[in-house]
Amino acid sequence: MTSSSDAAVPVTSDLPRSGPAGKATSGDGPPVKTSKRSRLGRNLAAAIAVGVGLGALILVSLLIVSEGFVLVLAAVTAIGTWELAGALRRGADIRVSLPVLLAGGQAVVWLSWPFGLRGAAIALAATVLGCLLWRMREGAAHFVRDMSASLFVAVYVPLLVAFAVQLTVVSQGVGRVLTFLLCVIASDVGGYAAGVVAGRHPMAPTISPKKSWEGFAGSLVAGMVAGSLCVALLLDASWYWGTLVGALLVATATLGDLVESLIKRDLGIKDMGTLLPGHGGLMDRLDSLLPTAFVAWAALGIIVPVA
């Protein structure tokens, strides 16, 4: 899996850049020491290797037995929930109801397969009730704060993953998932190239100083091209609808990146975790994919209705 277009370039990413007094500053956390990296960002070789490995896992699970991708999504849900809960605790001493969220997240994912979004909604409601009961044991101190965070985690990770499940298990599921993923990947690659070559004007300097409008333009062009090709070749629909889908997914992926940048700034951390060399945590790769899964489900459901 990949993140949005800015993840690996100096102007358009959330990576350290040169700052005052020989320090490097991150768009998402406190100052960190300057390291001798290439101007392309983090350990590029490790990042590429991890990205290729994740891509191969996704393709194998989709092309051999498409429903096998649901198993990948269930694992992603568990790891992402764990990482986000850990980040909240490290950054702000917020204690979510992790055991309930892990179990409830799996229920949201797996019940959305046979029962659709109704199953996901029922599982989500049961998860919220379970979190209430679990947190009651620790008394009133910070109850609202911790419960609000638990609800946020439940919606941000498993519920949004459930929309990726819905892309997978319907007719033309492989084509829908590939359209969703390839548009985000194209956005990443296009933004990377444009950011390295021409990134000059910050897009959201108070949130993520290294994202540039030039990088976003590169993401938009690449995403629209990918959307046109995917919708025409994989879903047998008119290419111009794919242009619209690509633009929507790029915009959502970019907003997803900015939202996670705000979360990490608020918590005072740089990465959600350390699971993926060259990338950070898995949640650092899901930031653009989670909200984009919903938009892809909605847009493709209108343009290419489920038979």
Image: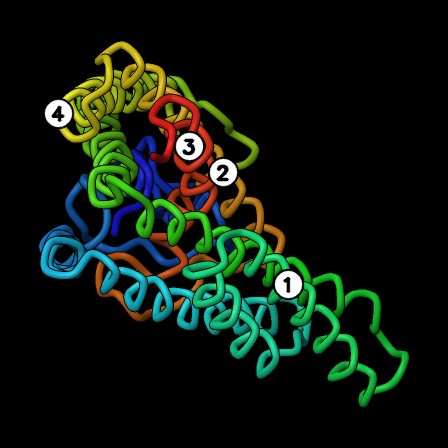
Earlier residue among tags 1 and 4? 1
Instruction: Tell me what residue is drawn at x 44 percent, y 67 percent.
Output: 110
- Expressed as whole percent of the image width and height from the top left, the position of residue 283 reads 41, 59
Mark 2–mark 1 Cα distance, whole angstroms, equals 30 Å
Mark 1–mark 4 Cα distance, whole angstroms, equals 36 Å
Task: Name the image quarter holding the C terminus.
Answer: top left
Q: Quick one: label 3, few (<14), some, or many (20+) residues within 10 Å?
A: many
* Residue type of the residue flagged with mark 3: Thr
On the image, which quarter does residue 289 sit in? top left
Mark 4 sits on what residue?
233
The numbered disc on residue 254 is 3
Mark 1 sits on what residue?
122
Instruction: Tell me what residue is drawn at x 21 percent, y 45 percent.
Output: 174
On the image, which quarter does residue 218 sit in? top left
Q: In this view, does 294 lie to the left or right of 242?
A: right
Image position of 165 with respect to 181: above or below: below
Earlier residue among tags 2 and 1? 1
Image position of 39 with respect to 70: above or below: above
For label 4, the SS is: helix
Image position of 135 with respect to 149: above or below: below
Mark 2–mark 3 Cα distance, whole angstroms, equals 6 Å
Residue sitting nearer the eye, 27 or 77: 77
Are circles 2 and 3 on residues that touch, CB within 8 Å? yes
For label 2, the SS is: helix
- Expressed as whole percent of the image width and height from the top left, the position of residue 286 reads 38, 52
Mark 1–mark 3 Cα distance, whole angstroms, equals 30 Å
Mark 2 sits on what residue?
258
Q: Quick one: label 4, few (<14), some, or many (20+) residues within 10 Å?
A: some
